Image (tube, helix red, strand yellow):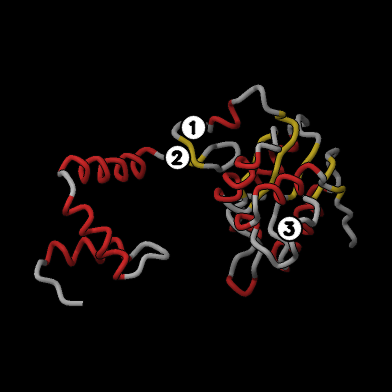
Amino acid sequence: MNFSSKLLEEAVNAFASLPGIGKKTALRLVLHLCKGELENSETFANAILNMRRGIKSCSKCHNLSDEEVCVICRDQRREQGVICVVESIRDVMAIEDTGQFRGVYHVLGGVISPLEGVGPGELNIDSLVQRIQTGEVREIIMAISPTIEGETTIFFISKKLRDLPVQISTIARGVSFGGELEYADELTLGRSITARVPYRNVD
């Protein structure tokens, strides 16, 4: 791809570095910005900078937040004794879109995957155990994608929690095995949360 402008090329390369954005799509986005008002580009750039500089990881659940503790964890109208354990922040958003869950969350930051070098120590598992040890949590819902890695993660966490007085549930299998949670439709995902079942750890 030949460019008549070095500035244009740098902007296209910046957009193309984002996941799912190829050079042609990046060029189309950059040309759109070039055609628009300068103020629109400044607003766009400032939003990205402000987000990157100001966004935090919630100290309780590891969700993204503007404050030390996110709005979901601070909301006293939610069931603080029910924690939905998910792989990623995108899963929190997917479940919130269903409108079926009124508890709080805990974001693991991934799943156990030895082939990819991800062990329990790379995930937010110890902080989950600490939350439960306070005695305020009565149920853990494992809303983790039904894959081999996901099942391994659920099994590992359930073993860590087996001596604690907390009920462990998993989402109902409306989500097909091998599927990614974030891609499930809202109705299926909502029903899976509502129809959750107790998890039985088989050693």
Q: Nearer the viewer, residue 70 or 45?
A: 45
When the figure is inspected, residue 181 is found, relative to residue 186, above or below; the finding is below
Amino acid type of the residue that numbered disc 3 sits on in the rendered structure: Val
In three-dimensional space, the C-alpha distance between marks 3 and 1, rounded to whole angstroms, equals: 33 Å
Amino acid type of the residue that numbered disc 1 sits on in the rendered structure: Glu
| First in residue order: circle 1 vs circle 2 | 2
| First in residue order: circle 3 vs circle 1 | 1
Q: Which residue is mark 3?
A: 175
Q: Position of residue 165 (x, y in %)?
A: 85, 38
Check disc 3 and report its element: helix, strand or loop. Answer: loop
| First in residue order: circle 3 vs circle 2 | 2
Residue 23, picture quadrant: bottom left
Amino acid type of the residue that numbered disc 2 sits on in the rendered structure: Lys
Residue at point 37%, 38% (across, down)? 54
Q: Nearer the viewer, residue 58 or 98?
A: 98
When the figure is inspected, residue 197 is found, relative to residue 50, above or below; the finding is below
Check disc 2 and report its element: helix, strand or loop. Answer: strand
Is there CB contact under 8 Å for labels 1 and 2? yes
Check disc 1 and report its element: helix, strand or loop. Answer: loop
Q: Position of residue 112 (x, y in %)?
A: 66, 63
In three-dimensional space, the C-alpha distance between marks 3 and 2, rounded to whole angstroms, equals: 31 Å
Residue at point 16%, 76% (across, down)? 2
Q: Nearer the viewer, residue 103 or 39?
A: 39
Q: Position of residue 50 (x, y in %)?
A: 31, 39
- The N terminus, quarter of image: bottom left
Q: Which residue is mark 1?
A: 68
Instruction: Name the residue at the top extreme.
Output: 76
Q: Which residue is mark 2?
A: 56
Q: Residues within 10 Å of mark 3 (few under 14, many from 20)?
A: some
